[in-house]
Amino acid sequence: MAVPKILLFYAFTPLSDPEAVRLWQRELCEANGLRGRILLSRDGINGTVGGDIDGVKRYLRRTKEYPAFRDLDVKWSEGTGLDAGGASIDFPKLSVKVRDEIVSFGAPDELRVTEDGVVGGGARLSPEGLNALAAERDDLVLFDGRNAFEAQIGRFEGAVVPDVSTTRDFVEVLDSGAYDHLKDKPVVTYCTGGVRCEVLSSLMIARGFSEVYQLDGGVVRYGERFGDDGLWNGSLYVFDKRGSLDFSDHTAVIGACVVCDGATKEMRNCADPSCRTQLVVCAEHDDVRCDVHAGSTTSD
């Protein structure tokens, strides 16, 4: 019986020929019927792919045989389903590209990577380690390393959520001094699967933050360990057709529809084809349009 699975993975490791790795990865995905998105750079690999569990397993086994990817950070989750050809319906196509960065902070020259990973990043915290530190330190700051819209449907209790619409905005926000008051506090960065915080924590340390941690494996791994019975609250936004992940049968719905303020975890693109803004909406208002300049929303 075909079982849909989705794989979220990354590795920071030097790649001497990212283009050659791209060709190999694309061929490997195609051979195993996978769809999704993979980014490669001189600093490593970052991807999410989906398909039948057997194909995903074969892909992962072959990928980890490559010496640079033997320590690949991997998270599994359930896919929505497979189409008649056995391909994941959670991804429209397969995209494998080489970029300057595998996470687009717009600061490739600041990142230093060796065979051991990112140089100068935050100390890693396991899910258990995060809970222990939160219990010990009443001045602990949880710092959301995702786009602000992602936090509207799920976030850690009391987290600082920077007002950023893209990952590239973080450098400007940090350089603005908006969070300089946190530089002497213990700061735990978190993101979906951990990859963004590998870079974010190093950028913060380089800018004088004195005690920086990163949640190892991100919210995905924390949710796998504690479900909705820990510090996390709500649903986890994901960048595929599923839209979000819940970690238990009692996940809180913390999102509020931008039109009627009703409780929802659903997000949709603005109905205006020229606008890429993500909006929290309920089923009744999924045709909502926004005027991002005026800050208003309308529903047809």
Image (cartoon, grey):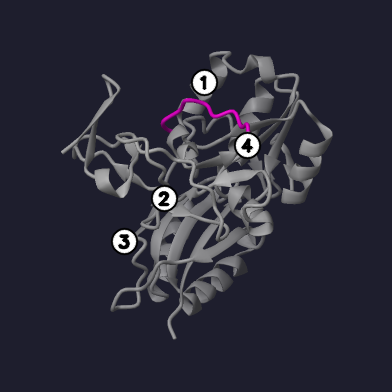
- Horizontal side of residue 74 vs 214, given as left or right: left
Residue 270 quadrant: top left
Name the residue at 34% across, 38% down: 278
Who is closer to the viewer here, 8 or 259?
A: 259
Name the residue at 29% across, 42% down: 269
State the mark number for residue 294.
Answer: none
Mark 3, mark 4: which one is toward the viewer?
A: 4
Mark 4 or mark 2, earlier in chain:
4
**Residue position marked by numbered label 3 in the rendering:** 93
**Do tag 1 and tag 2 residues touch (Cβ < 8 Å)?**
no
Q: Looking at the picture, does residue 238 appear above or below residue 119?
A: below
Distance from the alpha carbon under mark 1 to that under mark 2: 23 Å
**Do tag 4 and tag 1 residues touch (Cβ < 8 Å)?**
no
Q: How many labels does the image show?
A: 4
**Residue position marked by numbered label 4 in the rendering:** 157
State the image coordinates of residue 2 (x, y, percent, origin top left).
43, 81
**Residue position marked by numbered label 2 in the rendering:** 239
Distance from the alpha carbon under mark 2 to that under mark 3: 13 Å
Distance from the alpha carbon under mark 3 to that under mark 4: 36 Å
